[in-house]
Image: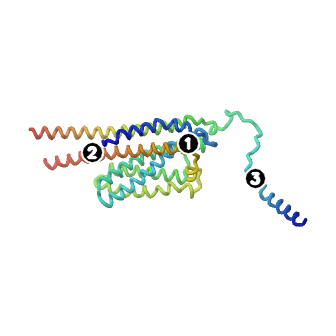
Amino acid sequence: MRILIRAIAVACVLMVQVAPSVAQTQPRQQEVFTPIDQLPPQEQLPAAPLLVGAYAFVLLMLFGYLVMVSRRLTAIRTEVDRLDADVKRSGKG
Amino acid sequence: MPKWFQPTTLLCGALFAISPFVIANAPYESTMGLVQKVFYYHMPSAWVFLTASVICGIASARFLATGNLRHDRTALAAAEMVVLFGLLTLVTGPLWARKAWGTWWVWDARITSSLVGWMIGWAYLILRQYGGPGSEKLSAGLALFGMANVPFIYVSVNYWRTIHPATTVVPKLPFSMGFPLLFCLASFFLLMFLLMSLRMRVAEQQARLDAIYLSLDERA
């Protein structure tokens, strides 16, 4: 009997220790229903424009870089061709 | 361009065309919802940014050790990848954070060190462009600092207080989210490889052109 009382006492002490942390982890009870237009602006922010903006930015930047490098390559090739033609012309002259 | 370039470009284009459908099929994350899908382009951009920093550092070290200009051209191409993909990372991150965290920017260790890494990439390119003769060796030294910053960027979320997700998130992704991520990673790494090849080709042609001008000057 004494052992049982001791076990119950230990269990009670442990429950007292654990109870606050359990209470903290439980979600708070909802007291009112809030319409979405009354939320703070940060929480009303739609996700789709941000998502589309991120993807569009990535694709535009990649495309822009590709065009820039291709133009650089074309310009160098044109210059090499022009030099080749000049060298040939001066060789004939 | 080499024979493999065109089919690889087509493959990369196909991967990017398919990627929105793969991403659309991924499930919504429970707390962030739709905006979390920025992750599938944000994280591959960040990984390419970090990989390019490492490539730039290794190529610069090899250039400093051997003086081989091929390594210098690799480092230059990689530095442009650092700037390009760093920009993508630093822009897509805030677009995600605005909704998920309620703020565009936080000066935490990862974001700040990423910004520093990106600015080192810019410094490398500016030094190459305006540094005059010998600037390639100075910029190679700078690239070593850029590479040294990479492990710091990666582990920073585990050691400093931040709202950035920890590095354990990716290994623990379920298949439904892990597959789109791997798909996008493959697309971005293939794109980096192609863009670097193209940029190195430009540098080679520029070197050839400079050599022609030099020989013409010597003849005159």
Q: CA distance from mark 2 to mark 1?
A: 40 Å
Please say if A54 is above or below B146: above
Q: How dense is the environment of label 3, judged by Cα within 10 Å: few (below 14), some, or many (20 and up)?
A: few
Q: CA distance from mark 1 to mark 3?
A: 32 Å
Disc 2 target residue: B205
Query: Farthest residue in the bottom direction?
Result: A2
Disc 1 target residue: B96
The type of residue carrying mark 3 is Val
Badge nearest the viewer, 2 or 1: 2
The type of residue carrying mark 2 is Gln
Badge nearest the viewer, 1 or 3: 3
Mark drawn on residue A22: 3
- Identify the residue at horizontal 77%, vertical 51% (top origin): A23
The type of residue carrying mark 1 is Trp
Q: CA distance from mark 2 to mark 3?
A: 68 Å
**B55 to the left or right of A74:** right
